[in-house]
Amino acid sequence: MNEPRLSAVELFSKINGKPILQGINFEVEAGALIGVIGPNGAGKSSLLKHLSGYLTPSSGNVFIKGQSLGALSSSERAAQVSYLPQSNRVEFPYKVTELVSLGLVNNANLSIKEKKQKIAIALKRLDIEYLADRTVDHLSGGEQQLVHLARILLQNTPIILLDEPSASLDIGHEAQLMNILHSLVKEQKTVVVALHNLNTAAEFCDRLMLLQSGRLIADGKPDKILTQELVQTLYPYQVQVSTNTVTGNPNILAVKKLKT
């Protein structure tokens, strides 16, 4: 059996004495698209921050190919893990190509021409070449998110962590993003993405990790996790789980509560 590319062992974390993560354990191998789901406040963002090294656990550890994340230098970490946080609004007048070029941190030896070519390819992959000469502070939230994603693509790490990357995107760009993530998995990348949209998670993710109150309460294929019973327990409102007639994956709908 191959050594896991990313793993967490007994991960505990507290902020101001309040438990945030409680005994998280999992392993992820190469070539997997993992969705982290759960209600608001479940610990999804906190988990990704710990996996990226942005936060240090109170106890337990994160391992990259068997090596402790905390033992890696900043440059070693940048070569292994890229991380896109939930909030990354830019208010400074950086040119789009300048911001995207930050993703070339692992390619310092490239010529200026080669760097420009890589930036152009990343922008084209996300269909945002038209933004190249604009400044980031004048872009919409969705456009900024796509620019940040281009930067992540350029970083070209084996592990990619994304926190609600489609939150500011319309449905067309959300589908585009998830298909790109799916293509990265085919290139043997390991992608862990926090998602609120359960239908998106069901359609695109190979595996779902379900958090509640900082605990990992379920881990498996989408059809085993997104059951009527479990979804109704986590989201105690009018929610109906059915089957997508096209793909066969779970389909979760909010149902209007009828007056009685």
Image: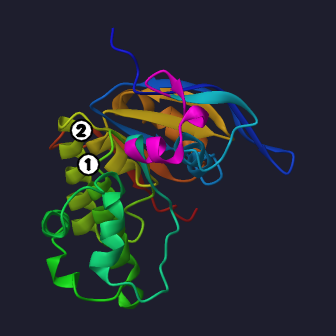
Which label number is shown at residue 119?
none
The residue depicted at 47 percent of the width and 62 percent of the height is 256
Please, which residue is most extreme toward the top here? Answer: 1
Mark 1 surroundings within 10 Å by alpha-carbon count, few (fewer than 14), some (14 through 19), many (20 or more): many
Judged left or right of residue 61, residue 160 is left
Q: Position of residue 79 (x, y in %)?
A: 38, 44
**How far across and how far down the image is residue 103, in percent?**
33, 61
Can residue 235 be seen at all in this image of the molecule? no
Residue that sits furthest to the right in the current view: 17
**Would you identify the image quadrant in which residue 65 lies?**
top left
Instruction: Tell me, yes or no, whether the two marked residues, 1 and 2, touch with CB atoms within 8 Å.
Output: yes
Q: Nearer the viewer, residue 27 or 228?
A: 27
Q: Is residue 240 magenta?
A: no
At horizontal 37% and vertical 70% (from top left) the residue drawn is 145
Boundaries of the magenta span: 64-79
Q: Which residue is mark 2?
A: 185
For badge 2, the amino acid type reads Val
Pointer 1: what residue?
A: 181
